[in-house]
Image (cartoon, rainbow, N blue to C red):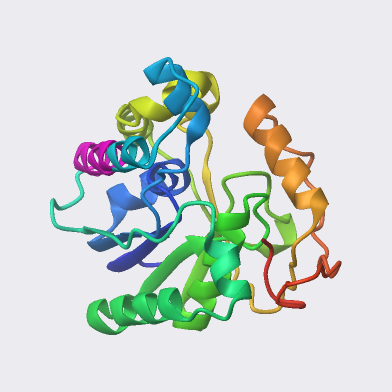
Amino acid sequence: MTFDRVLLIAPHPDDEVIAAGGLIQRAGELRVVFITSGENNPWPQRAMRRTWRITDADRAEWAAMRRREALASLAVLGAPADCASFLDFPDGRIAALARRGDASLRDALRAHVDDFQPSLVVAPSMQDFHSDHRAVSWYAHQATGRGIVTYVVHGDGAPRRLRFTIALTDEERARKRRAIECHVSQLLLGRRRFLSYAHGPEEFFAPELDLAYTESRVHTIRHACFALFGARSARKEAAADVEDRAGDVPGVLGG
């Protein structure tokens, strides 16, 4: 597997370093596309600001801070200063866009693919518990087709779908940890969980056009438990979730 021209797609600032901080260090030419700016992040916001009510202005300020954190993190990893692009789609609402048939994210990603001509696209997985990750994965597959691998941040990917693993050197691991520490807003309530991503190998999975994940309460509950307790589920073979709900895109994506 060669990393000469890598297009990395991240649903939120911090997903890029958590999932692929080692790969970023090994990439030749790199472009990182952030789908959202992570503005819908109420609990860390409330803890940092010591207030319950979060206004639109607060969310905009938080988004700007998270963009700065992402740029600082990429700089620690040695990425070029101009490699990042922020699309500013609504945090927490990507699945809703897909269910409405909104093609704007697909078109934006396709424009990046056409412009950058990557040798490898790295995108979130439909196996992920987080609805934004599953929906972004669906859009990424629609935009790119072949030449894509996926990563799981919330939960575990099925071992049978594993495409390759990157075992980080001690130096790469230390740099990845420093890069994660740039995301100060996210460490406030989950420092131990976030820093744990610096220790293990990075896993990347096969393309997922054959998977059929749809919205389900199970995914929502699993993501909530993962966010609260930081525990990864026991590895097991992933099966397609075809429990369609009203308003879903049947057999395609999870909300």
In this picture, residue 160 sits left or right of residue 59: right
- Res 146 visible: no
Using residue 5 as the reference point, say whether residue 153 is left or right of it: right
Q: Which quadrant holds residue 174?
A: top left
Q: Which residue occupies the extreme top position in the image?
A: 50
Q: Nearer the viewer, residue 200 or 128?
A: 128
User: Magenta residues, as a range?
Assistant: 64-77
Q: Depth check: 233 or 133 in front?
A: 133
**Extreme right residue here?**
243
- Extreme left residue here? 81
Q: Is residue 221 visible?
A: yes
In terms of secondary structure, what is the magenta stretch mainly? helix
Q: Position of residue 40 (x, y in %)?
A: 47, 43
Q: Residue at x 34, y 25 (%)?
A: 184
Out of 29 and 71, give the one closest to the viewer: 71
| Residue 222 image point, x, y percent | 75, 42
Which residue occupies the foreground of this view, 143 or 246? 246
In the figure, 109 relative to 30: above or below? Answer: below
User: Where is 254 relative to 18, above or below?
Assistant: below
Query: In which quadrant is the C terminus drawn?
Result: bottom right
Left or right, residue 75 beside residue 98: left
Instruction: Determine whether 57 is above or below 28 in the image.
Output: above
Q: Where residue 239 sits: x, y (%)? A: 83, 64
Name which quarter of the figure residue 206 lies in: bottom right
**Location of the N terminus (image quadrant):** bottom left
In this figure, what is the number of numbered marks? Answer: 0
Magenta-drawn stretch contains 58:
no
Q: What residue is shown at x 36% (from left), y 49% (from top)?
A: 37
Residue occupying image coordinates x 40% and y 61%: 89
Q: Position of residue 103 (x, y in %)?
A: 47, 81
